[in-house]
Image: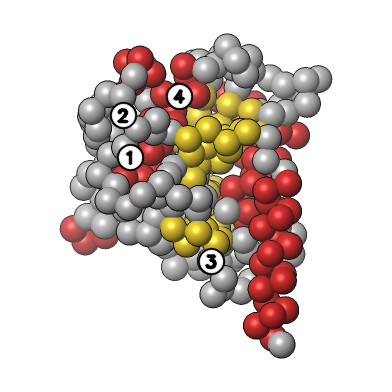
Amino acid sequence: MKNLSAFLILLLLSMSVYSQKKELIYLWPGKVPGELKEKLPPSIDTSKSGNVFRYSEVTNPGIEVYLPNLVAKNGSAVIVCPGGGYNILAYDLEGTEIARWLNKLGFTAFVLQYRIPDKKEGALQDVQRAMRIVRENSKKWNIDPEKIGVMGFSAGGSLSARASTLFNKKTYHPVDKADSLSCRPSFTMLIYPAYLDQGANLSLTPELELSKEVPPVFIFQTADDPYGNSALVMAGALRNAKLPFELHMLATGGHGYGLRPGKAAAETWPLLAEKWLRLKALIN
């Protein structure tokens, strides 16, 4: 009976997620580079609890489009990368709920369904391709192509940091004319990011290349987060490279809280992020 109840709850969550979809654009018209499995709809994770809708496998990456109210629309956009250890996607907690928050601020949001599980290189290909597709279709959504940022949570923060430092790295063969466009984000938001301190002696992860072209970065984390050192290391590296960033850390809050009420961290970072976004994404 318990299993049936859990299944029904997940089914309702799934129906809720799909009922809110506006448009889903698949990233790869032909074969997905490096993918061995056939293209299938994302697999729903039924094994976890915590009131989070999760995907356990993605073989056909895409972006889900969330459009703001026409009155609020500001001409900027954000690609949102949910977290999940590169093994699952916490799709509502760190994806669709974030997209709706961004819509309220006037941003067009794109929730990235990147490849999982354990496909870090594929995930980088997916976020690069997503950025190019959004740029190519910027007129369709009335977006300024120079004001398209990336935002990630936990492993999605790792992916966003990689997208913001490895934009000159060619990770796949061009597919169409979209791939002639830049995949450099205009701004970057890292919310409780993970895996940024995997260098020697907990230094910056070696693959992250801090060139002068790295976009402005907003970082939020808490001191008791098990991945909290990622924020400190990333901020220190950005400072040493004389690159623009803003770092906020609270004493407590843990990890994986998204926007949900009940924790000071979840109620604090959106206020700070909104102020930063208005300066970096709308004015610059």
Name the foreground residue: 25 vs 113: 25
Kind of residue sitting beneath label 4: Ile
The N terminus lies in quadrant: bottom right
* Residue 217 in picture, x, y percent from top left: 46, 35
Q: Are marks 2 and 1 in contact (CB under 8 Å)?
A: no
Name the foreground residue: 40 vs 79: 40
Identity of the residue drawn at 65% across and 83% down: 3
Of the two numbered discs 3 and 4 on the same chain, state the one appearing first in sequence. 3
Q: Mark 3 points at which residue?
A: 45
Give me the C-alpha separation between circle 1 and circle 3: 22 Å
Of the two numbered discs 2 and 1 on the same chain, state the one appearing first in sequence. 1
Q: Do the residues labelled 2 and 4 touch (CB within 8 Å)?
A: no
Identity of the residue drawn at 66% across and 73% down: 7
Q: In this view, does 222 lie to the left or right of 193?
A: right
Q: Mark 1 points at which residue?
A: 32
Q: Is residue 269 left or right of residue 164?
A: right
Crowding at label 4, few (<14), some or many (≥20) Cα neighbours within 10 Å?
Answer: many
Q: Mark 4 points at which residue?
A: 133
Marks 1 and 3: which is nearer the front? 1
Q: Is residue 53 left or right of residue 176?
A: right
